Amino acid sequence: MRVAIIHMRHAHTGGTERYLNLVAKDLAEAGHEPVVVCRSHEEPPHPAVSFVRLRPLALGAAHRMLGFAKAVERHLTGADYDLVFGLGKTWNHDVIRLGGGCHATYLELAHDATRTALERRIGKGAKKHRLALEIEARALAADPRRKGGGRPLVICNSHLVERDVIARHGLDPARVRVIHNGTDTERFHPRLRASEGAALRAELGWGPHEEVLLFLGTGYGRKGLGVVLEATARLAPTRPALRLLVVGYDSAQKDFEARAKALGIAERTQFLGGRRDAERCYAAADVYALPTRYDPFANSTLEAMASGLVTITTPTNGGSELIEPGLSGHVLASEPDSPAEVAELADAIAFWLDHREAGGRAARSTAEAHDARHMTRVTRELLEALAQSGD
């Protein structure tokens, strides 16, 4: 089958982009013809993957998003595809994957944590977010041009998103499928602890006896770094070996470094910024904490588990659905950014530092059942069945 995969940006970094490459490669290896319809692209993940590049004139992020969606609509009008698979903010799909969840939920739960006080006052990005909501509604509405002549088949990466999209958009549950994210269980592996992990610890001046807590995420406010800093400070007096490793990009990193200093934990905290060797960072850690305000499914959850790390996160991270509380990690129940959440997180960190070996084995076992190859195979089989049935 000839499959159009629609996403504005094709690259080899980024969660949706990595998913696109995995699915396109799997389709190509199965003998299908995947065509990535995009605004920009890098090298294809497989020689049989081709590109259609649509680059309408755009002034600003909102106009760029809308212009691309309209260009996709024009392209599909005269194109011959057996199936159209959307991954982003466009509306002409037979199948759409809500990798970012419902946009309204992101705005309600997390958006304010990504903005400065000034950006909140001036309403920065309001037009782009309004357009994103409108495009999402249009993408999920009935359209006679789709397979079956109705609403698209919706793929969600968690039951969290499944419940949300059904409630917000009135979808028939029969038109929604949950396929959890997968990960590279060879790249992220406990065996790296003795090599890459030990080497990174040495670079940081830490030895094998330090207790390393890892926070890894871009967008410190939304991902909950403030709570991690507070919990670390709470534990510091009774755990002299505790160290905090912060990985990921945020333009406000200096502010968080100042906060660590004010809390008295600057000497035991290392900010590494954005990196492309996440596997080394997991390998250098003992416990992973991500008290995120909202993640439809944080890939780092599964990466950490594959690396043999106990993971502590929130119920507003779809990745929490893979955690077995008390066996492979902890799902926080307290109000976000509250003193109760700080206390709960600190208690969970302390418990799992003391039980990290058993918890890490359980986490790795769960991750092995969610290898990326399994996820792409299930996705491909779903696309094949839809194309053959016409529903």
Image (cartoon, rainbow, N blue to C red):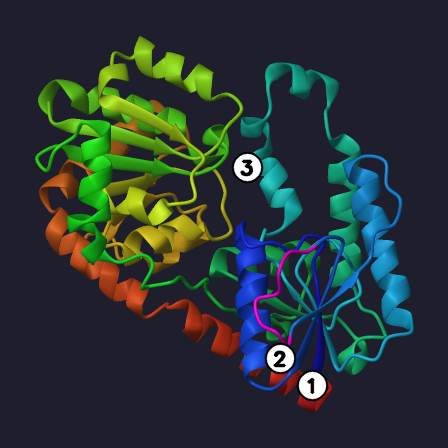
Does the rendering let one see residue 69? yes
Q: Which of the numbered marks, if any, corresponds to residue 1?
A: 1
Does the rendering let one see residue 265? no
**Which residue is pictured at 86% across the width and 49% down the height?**
67
Disc 1 residue type? Answer: Met
The question of residue 171 being in magenta is answered with: no
Looking at the image, which is closer to me, 220 or 159?
220
Q: Position of residue 182 (x, y in %)?
A: 42, 64
Q: Quadrant of the N terminus?
A: bottom right
Q: Are marks 3 and 1 in contact (CB under 8 Å)?
A: no
Quarter where residue 210 is shown: top left
Residue assigned mark 2: 383
Instruction: Tell me the SS state at disc 3.
Output: helix
Residue assigned mark 3: 109
Residue bounds of the magenta highlight: 41-48
Q: Nearer the viewer, mark 1 or mark 2?
A: 1
Disc 2 residue type? Answer: Leu
